[in-house]
Image: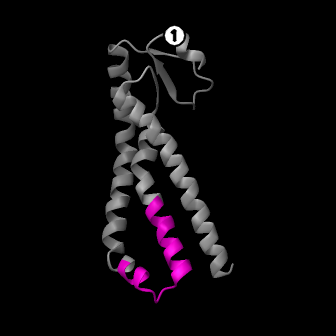
């Protein structure tokens, strides 16, 4: 694949990961605001914590394939790459192991605060918490 093809693929993957991150962050913001409808599950925590890693990796690909390995951007990125990747990788792994207990704690917290759960479409779909069961159809 030519360099410009790899750069376009990196841009596409960056846009997709940022769109997924924005969608998932809206779920987390609704949890912090304690809105009437909250969508939450363990994979949401994992995606929230690992989104910076994905954005960094795809952005580094864009810089490498667009500007080349001799550019100043690439050299600066590579100077701190090992530290940044190690930190983001540890953050992603910790997020994976933390996500299940946090999901249980959020479930208990929301049910104690008067939220009710809607029926789920499948066992893989996130849990929807609502203040009033009439909001389940929305």
Q: Determine the residue positioned at 47% across, 59% down.
A: 54
Image quadrant occupied by the N terminus: bottom right
The quarter of the displayed image where residue 105 is located: top left
| Residue 77, image x, y percentages | 38, 76
Q: Is residue 48 magenta?
A: no
| Residue 14, image x, y percentages | 54, 60
The quarter of the displayed image where residue 103 is located: top left
Q: Is residue 74 left or right of residue 9?
A: left
Query: Residue lying farthest right?
Result: 1
Magenta stretch, main secondary structure, is helix
Q: What is the magenta range?
A: 55-76
Q: Is residue 28 above or below residue 48?
A: above
How crowded pointer 1 is (Cα within 10 Å; few <14, some 14-19, many 20+) is rated as few
Image quadrant occupied by the C terminus: top right
| Residue 69, image x, y percentages | 48, 86
Q: Determine the residue positioned at 47% across, 66% down.
A: 57
Q: Is residue 138 above or below residue 73?
A: above
Q: Determine the residue positioned at 67% across, 81% down.
A: 2
Q: Residue beneath label 1, please?
A: 133
Q: Is residue 13 left or right of residue 37?
A: right
């Amino acid at each position: 694949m030519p360099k410009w093809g790899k750069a376009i693929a990196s841009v596409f993957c960056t846009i997709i990961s940022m769109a997924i991150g924005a969608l998932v962050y809206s779920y987390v913001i609704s949890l912090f605001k304690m809105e009437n409808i909250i969508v939450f599950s363990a994979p949401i925590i994992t995606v929230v914590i690992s989104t910076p890693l994905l954005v960094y990796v795809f952005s580094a690909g864009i810089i490498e394939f667009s500007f080349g390995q001799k550019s100043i951007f690439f050299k600066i990125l590579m100077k701190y790459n090992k530290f940044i990747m190690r930190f983001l990788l540890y953050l992603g792994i910790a997020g994976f192991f933390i996500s299940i207990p946090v999901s249980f704690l959020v479930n208990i917290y929301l049910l104690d605060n008067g939220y009710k759960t809607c029926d789920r479409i499948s066992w893989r779909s996130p849990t929807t918490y609502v203040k009033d069961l009439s909001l389940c159809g929305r």
